[in-house]
Amino acid sequence: MGPLGKKLQNLLFGGSTDPDKRFYRTFMVFAVGTIIIMFIAGLATFFLTLQGVEQTMVPDVTGMEIENALVDLEEKALYSSVQLRYTQNIEDKGLVVGQDPEPGTSVRAGTRVILKVSKGSAVEKLDDYIGWNVDDLEAHIKSMVSIYGPLLSVKKPITRVYDSSAAGTILVQSPEPGTEISAATELELVVSMGPEGQTRKVLDYTGLTFGEVIESVTKTNLRFVFTTKNAGKNDVPGTVVSQSPAADSDVPNDTIMQFVIAKPEKTPEGYVFGILERTLPDYQVPVTLTVDAITPDGARKQLFTMKHSGGLITIPYLEQENTLLKVSIADKEIITYAIRAVRE
């Protein structure tokens, strides 16, 4: 055996010629070698697999609505950053007009993609709303609200004047039609209340429940006051038994109707009948009055809404005990009343 063979023998077997020792040393060398090779192979596989999972392709989201673009990026495990900018075309509003990195770029998962989103045209011209009904205009403005908020809103309170045109008709607007706007703008309006001194014929409300009466009179913004009395022999409990002015009378539009309700003799278990009475400030122009009821389980329902000039309001109710009555003026809550049963 040459010198090289002897050195290898010494390295592997320590120069021993004992068969048992030689077998043991050979086994240990191969065992350690196998473990090292398996470790290296596993580590290589791990890094190759990790690299494959982390790599993803940037999708093309240009021209898409921002909501859909964000969903596409999330599906590719990519983050987003939005940059808003004006564009020449008003119809581009809310669309992605550019992105970085470019579509098709291979990046690691978790990479941030910058989305350039249009705010629409830098300058828009104000439409002519004169002759519109103010309620229709407010619904139109709400329909134009985007994820960036409304560009246009109606300034409150609205100035209302008597005019020969129908009630609710817009007579004057400021800024004027054709004005160029590029930022959030409040639209000041002058709206018709209808002809001054205009009269209406009073309907017959006797025999109706207070709920039916309120539903009818609030449609025409006719102000009302309710009082109660004990039910007489010919009265139906829970209904209106008298009214003033009388049915078929011709009265001015600002007349306050007065109704008398025969008290219910019985109410469902857990329910309370009563009248909430409050006095509001006098308003220069009619404001939107809304009354909601929130039941003990949290359900909210609107009892009625109408235009009101302030002064005395009376709100009859037949609701569950612990229901909350919420009175709002122009969407701002001003009165909260908790319904409680009277304990004797």
Image (tube, rainbow, N blue to C red):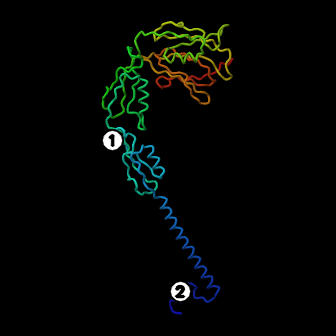
Taking depth in this image into account, of 84 and 95 the one nearest to the observer is: 95
Work out how far the residue at label 2 is from the one at label 1, CA to CA, in angstroms: 78 Å
Could you tell which of marks 2 and 1 lies nearer the N-terminus? 2
Question: Would residue 39 be found to the left or right of residue 95 on screen?
Answer: right
In contact (CB < 8 Å): disc 2 and disc 1: no
Q: Which numbered marker is on residue 8?
A: 2
| Tag 1 residue | 87
Q: Tell me if mark 1 has few (under 14), some (14-19) or many (20+) residues whose alpha carbon lies within 10 angstroms of its own.
A: some
Looking at the rendering, in which quadrant would you find the C terminus?
top right
Q: Position of residue 21 (x, y in %)?
A: 63, 85
In this view, the residue farthest toward the left is 179
Query: Quick one: SS at disc 2?
Result: helix
Task: Specify the quadrant of the image occupied by residue 211.
Answer: top right
Residue at the spot 44% in from the left edge and 28% down from the top edge:
139
* Residue 140 percent across, percent down from the top left: 42, 29
- Within 10 Å of disc 2 (Cα), the crowding (few <14, some 14-19, many 20+) is few
Three-letter residue code for mark 1: Thr
| Quadrant in the picture for residue 299 | top right
